[in-house]
Amino acid sequence: MLLAVAALAFAGCADTTLKSSWTAPGVTKLKFNKMVVIALAANRNFNRKMAESAVANSATRVKIVPSCELLPGLDDVKNKATVIKMIQDNEFDGVITLRIAARDTRVMSGSSSTLPMDYLTFSGYYGSVYDVSAYYLDDGNRATYQDKIISLEVNIYDVKTMKLVWSGTTQTIKDAANPGSVPAAVQEVAKVIRAKLQDDKLLN
């Protein structure tokens, strides 16, 4: 049961970790038969559909339905009464919500992209090389890379009690040059969260 496998479009050359998690007191197992996933997007319905569909497609042991199939408009999914009616009418027993909690950018410096001509032959390794080496080691002459850091909050609710039963926040560092795809992101985030749920004995 790939619960809480939140993902917007970040994968590719990425590194995902679970930064924090919380389980409601008294909850020892997470067991659902039919769930709905709701991506909380401020104004981009396209991103919402991609994320929800990716989560639903990743499920193997529980039926997960994208909320966009039942409430296609963003205004509908923002209306509490409308969402609760949708949950009750479709007899869902669990809800997954996804929300981007934070975004950041990390700039990394690599080695210089060019070398002095003297380095091309061993006979010139000494001498003028040392006069110009400071230029090539200067940060302004190094190749730079930007990584996107995205924190995603995943919540699981039990419809019977309408209470939050599990919450986790993942952090993904994405190579901006290789954004990857939503399905790949789901697999990466799902693996991290599933491992945590199994370690905590919440999943078999």
Image: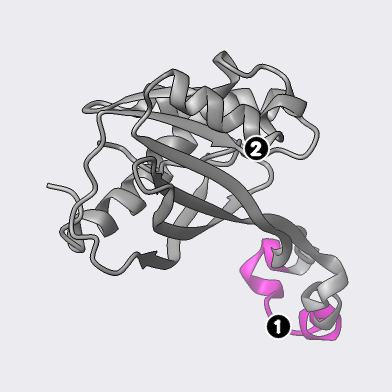
Whether residue 139 is situated above or below residue 110 in the rendered picture:
below
**Residue bounds of the magenta highlight:** 119-133
Residue nearer the viewer, 149 or 96: 96
Where is mark 2, residue-wise?
A: 80
Whether residue 20 is situated above or below residue 84 in the rendered picture:
below
* Neighbour tally class for label 1: few under 14, some 14-19, many 20 plus, Cα within 10 Å: few
Q: How far separated are the C-alphas under marks 1 and 2?
A: 72 Å
Residue nearer the viewer, 12 or 161: 161
Q: Answer whether residue 110 is visible to the viewer in this image.
A: yes
Q: Residue at position x 12%, y 47% from top?
A: 204
Whether residue 31 is situated above or below residue 133 in the rendered picture:
above
The N terminus lies in quadrant: top left
Residue nearer the viewer, 63 or 54: 63
Where is mark 1, residue-wise?
A: 126
Q: Residue at position x 85%, y 85% from top?
A: 131
- Circles 1, 2 touching at the beta carbon (< 8 Å): no
The dot on residue 6 is none
In the displayed structure image, the side of residue 157 where residue 60 appears, left or right = left
In the displayed structure image, the side of residue 190 where residue 180 appears, left or right = right
